């Protein structure tokens, strides 16, 4: 996913993401920019990958917001640098929180947001995409070295989700956000 909050011509492509907090987000944004200089990153975990809508965005958001009312925050811990074999996308794996994010995706990929995705949902944080095949090995090596240097927490809480829309310029625009329930189960 490109970056958010840019101006441009909106297209029928929507997603649901959770932005990472600083200092982790700043570090990953700098790393992503180092790997793909033309990228305008904003570190996030995608909960619903890009999809077209058959309903108005406001109607889809209202449906989504209802579903999010009972969703509790998810604690996530980032793992290692990996590569998706088909697309050659570099990413950070997710350890703790992986199964919870998969269940959330399954629960939300319904109704007005239902979409048959081209790939099985796999929670992750993208580091680089659209690389030439000869660039992948070097990018993996660089990303792995930088990630090993990062000495701060690799964990964060998914406690807010943002509904975004893409543009022709591949700049994702924030449309709506929703804080997740902070109820504590006893």
Image (spheres, rainbow, N blue to C red):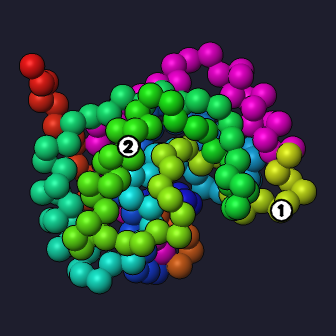
Question: Is 90 within the magenta?
Answer: no
Which residue appears at 33% of the width and 78% of the height? Answer: 53
Label 1 near label 2: C-beta < 8 Å? no
Q: For the magenta stretch, what is the residue range?
A: 138-167
Query: Where is mark 1, residue-wise?
Result: 132
Give percent across and percent down for residue 159. Answer: 29, 37
Is residue 89 shown above or below 164?
Answer: above
- In this view, the residue farthest toward the bottom is 54
**Secondary-structure class at tag 2:** helix
Give percent across and percent down for residue 56. Answer: 23, 80
**Residue 66 in view:** yes
Which residue appears at 65% of the width and 22% of the height? Answer: 150
Name the quadrant containing residue 186.
Answer: top left
- In this view, the residue farthest toward the left is 186
Give percent across and percent down for residue 135. Answer: 86, 53
Q: Residues within 10 Å of mark 2 (few under 14, many from 20)?
A: many
**Secondary-structure class at tag 1:** loop
Q: Earlier in the sequence, mark 2 or mark 1?
A: 2
Q: Nearer the viewer, residue 160 or 34?
A: 160
Name the quadrant containing residue 57.
Answer: bottom left
Which residue appears at 39% of the width and 63% of the height? Answer: 15
Query: Where is mark 2, residue-wise?
Result: 101
Which residue appears at 24% of the width and 81% of the height? Answer: 55
Distance CA(mark 2)–CA(mark 1): 30 Å
Q: Is residue 130 left or right of residue 120?
A: right
Q: Quadrant of the N terminus?
A: bottom right
Q: Residues within 10 Å of mark 1 (few under 14, many from 20)?
A: few
Is residue 161 shown above or below 164?
Answer: above
Q: Is residue 13 left or right of residue 110?
A: right
Question: Is 152 within the magenta?
Answer: yes
Give percent across and percent down for residue 73. Answer: 26, 34
């Amino acid at each position: 996913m490109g970056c958010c909050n840019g101006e441009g011509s909106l297209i029928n492509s929507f997603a649901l993401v959770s932005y990472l907090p600083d200092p982790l987000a700043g570090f990953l944004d700098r790393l992503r920019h180092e790997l793909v200089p033309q990228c305008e990153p904003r570190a996030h975990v995608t909960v619903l990958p890009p999809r077209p809508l058959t309903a108005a965005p406001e109607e889809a958001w209202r449906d989504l917001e209802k579903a999010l009312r009972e969703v509790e925050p998810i604690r996530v811990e980032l793992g290692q640098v990996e590569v998706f074999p088909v697309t050659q996308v570099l990413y950070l794996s997710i350890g703790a929180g992986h199964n919870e994010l998969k269940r959330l995706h399954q629960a939300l990929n319904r109704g007005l947001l239902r979409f048959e995705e081209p790939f099985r949902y796999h929670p992750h944080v993208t580091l680089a995409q659209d690389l030439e095949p000869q660039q992948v090995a070097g990018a993996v090596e660089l990303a792995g070295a930088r990630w090993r240097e990062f000495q701060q927490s690799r964990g964060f809480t998914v406690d807010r989700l943002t509904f975004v829309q893409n543009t022709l310029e591949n700049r994702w625009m924030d449309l709506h956000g929703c804080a997740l329930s902070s109820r504590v189960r006893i």
